Structure formats: C-alpha cells, structure tokens
Amino acid sequence: MSIESYRTLAGPGRDEVVIQKSRFIGQAWPCATEEDALACLRQVREQTRDAKHHCYAYIIGQNEGILRYSDDGEPGGTAGMPMLSLMRSEHLVNCCCVVTRYFGGILLGTGGLVRAYTQGCRIALDAAGIVRMERTCMDLCEVPYGYWDSVQYMLGKLPAKTEDLSFGAAVSFTLLTRALDRERVLRELAQASARQLESLEGGEKFAPWED
C-alpha cells in the first residue's frame, strides 16, 4: 500500500538552552537518506569538537525503516532514546536531530538528563518547523498569453501550486495538485482559458501542503 503523506521537517533548525549551567545546542534537519543524517552528525562534531557529548536520533523512511540513536557517553537511555521518542510522537520521518552538550559542572541526574535532552530536541524541531509532505501530481501546462491573466487569477483560488514558470512562445508551467484535486483544478483552468490550456501528465512527487 502506497503512502499518501508523511510529516517531516520544513528545513534545518537550531536553538539552544542553558540548564543548570550546561549548554544544550539542538539542531535538526530533513534527511532523505541515512547518509544525509550521518553527514549532518559529522558536521556538528567538526564544528563543536570541544563539546563532550553529541547525542542524536534519526528516522529514515516513510515507514520508519531506519531508526537510530546514541547517548554518546551520557548514561544509557537518557539522551538518544528520549529524543527519538519525541520525534516519533510527532510522527516525523526523514529527519535527524543532534543535541550537543557543553557540561557546566552540575550533575543533572538521570531524570534531569532525560528532560534536558528532550527539551534540546524540542527546541530544534520547533526551530526547523514541521511540514506535511503529500503525494502530488505534476502536469506540464501551456497556455496562450491572451488567457494567462485569467488562468493566473483562477490559480490563486484553487488548491494548486506552480513551478518552472516560463514565458516563451506561450506561458508554460508545471502544475502541482493533490491527486484528489487534480481533475477539478484542470477542469477549472480549462474553463478559465476557454479550453486553450494544454496539459501533459508529468508524474508524481511528494511536496509540502498546508493541513
């Protein structure tokens, strides 16, 4: 059964918090592959080599095919797993989070560490933003200049997006719609262009849409 949508991060995010004199830096990224996630981790380690702990968690695959986490020297179960649990509670996939700790000299205890790393992950996810990616139809469209204003006006009223807008012999663009909206959108654009709009199916991809 194909997946119609999934939740992931809108982009990279970074934030930090000081808890009992320890500095926790949370960073998160959308990642399509495990290699992407590991590259983000390497980047953090290179940039903050003087920090003792770089705890992380990542989830790859729309079905959570790859789940990985690490406490990186913190007591077992106090960092990576709480971070992973938070990400899963948000139903996130294809993303990675790293929380770097600069020790401030005060021991936080097991419960304190769990709360601190969960908070570090939380602020990173909030900074990155969460988006829903939905299966999206792409149609390659072309319309004569004389009808472009009407088509553009109608596009502003429909659940549709455009990419690759080009002005050549005619106005051409890639139309993005959710599968359930595709027929209605094409029908409305055909009417707006006096049936002068031509379209060709261009396949599918996942794209962000507002809930």
Image (cartoon, grey):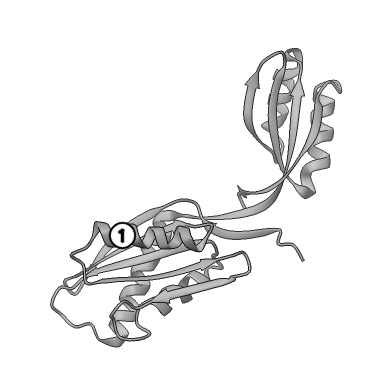
Place of residue 167 in the rendered image (x, y in percent of width and height, measured from the top left): 65, 17
Q: Residue at x 76, y 21 (%)?
A: 143
196 up-or-down from 110: above or below: above
Classed neighbour count for the residue bearing mark 1: other residues with Cα under 10 Å, few (<14), some (14–19), many (≥20): some
Q: Quadrant of the N terminus?
A: bottom right
Q: Residue at x 79, y 49 (%)?
A: 180
Element under disc 1: helix
Q: Which residue is denoted by mark 1 in the rendering? A: 44
96 up-or-down from 178: above or below: below
Q: Relative to the observer, which residue lies in front, 170 or 153?
A: 170
Count of marks, rendered view: 1
Task: Give, as a three-letter code, the residue at label 1.
Answer: Val
Q: Residue 138 vs residue 17: left or right? A: right
Q: Residue at x 86, y 23 (%)?
A: 195
Place of residue 73 in the rendered image (x, y in percent of width and height, measured from the top left): 28, 80
Q: Relative to the observer, which residue lies in front, 51 or 4?
A: 51
174 up-or-down from 171: above or below: below
Q: Residue 178 vs residue 7: left or right? A: right
Place of residue 192 in the rendered image (x, y in percent of width and height, measured from the top left): 80, 24
Q: Relative to the observer, which residue lies in front, 45 or 197?
A: 45
Farthest residue to the front: give it: 35
Farthest residue to the left: give it: 105
Place of residue 148 in the rendered image (x, y in percent of width and height, measured from the top left): 72, 19
